[in-house]
Amino acid sequence: MDENVNTNLGKFLQLARESKQLSLRAVEKATGVSNAYLSQVESGKIKQPSPTILHKLSELFEVSYADLLVLAGHPIPSENDSADKLPRTPDRFGMVTPDEEQALVEYLAFLRSRKGRKE
């Protein structure tokens, strides 16, 4: 990871904390993240804090979670990312009529019932 990116994250978090007039101990109390860990993040000794910690800090400091992820070097999920990578039915079969779609739904229900799956 680029050392400069990590320094920028630490400095950004320190400035955000100071702008809220919070001590490291106050941040610890509000987020549950130890003040020693926070100090190491701010100083750049922690190279890549977890997204969970960054989320807690973004909420407390009222800063963009996405910006913190970028500064920490984490990938940002895009709106186009999908957990389901399979093509949708029209993409796989071409256009289907409403009757064909209903038949496919019924057949899928039949297959699932045979495997003991619920719809």
Image: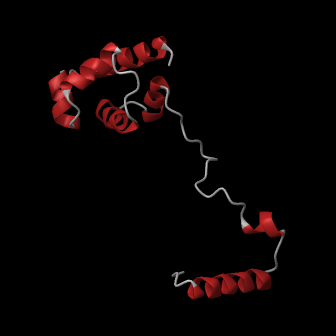
Coloring applied to the structure: secondary structure
Q: Percent position (x, y) of residue 100?
A: 79, 83
* Whether residue 26 can be seen here: yes
Q: In which quarter of the view is residue 115 placed? A: bottom right
Residue at 31% over, 32% down: 57
Residue at 37% over, 29% down: 49
Q: Which residue is outermost to the front? A: 115
Residue at 79% over, 65% down: 92
Q: How many marks?
A: 0
Say whether residue 57 is left or right of residue 72. left
* Whether residue 22 can be seen here: no
Viewer-proximal residue among 94 and 113:
113
Can you say whether 37 is above or below 118 in the image?
Answer: above
Locate the C terminus by quadrant. Answer: bottom right
Q: Percent position (x, y) of residue 113?
A: 57, 87
Residue at 51% over, 15% down: 2
Say whether residue 99 is left or right of residue 40. right
Can you say whether 7 is above or below 26 in the image?
Answer: above
Q: In which quarter of the view is residue 39 placed? A: top left
Say whether residue 78 is left or right of residue 52. right
Can you say whether 118 is above or below 37 in the image?
Answer: below
Q: In which quarter of the view is residue 29 placed? A: top left
Q: Percent position (x, y) of residue 48?
A: 41, 26
Viewer-proximal residue among 99 and 110:
110
Q: Percent position (x, y) of residue 66?
A: 47, 33
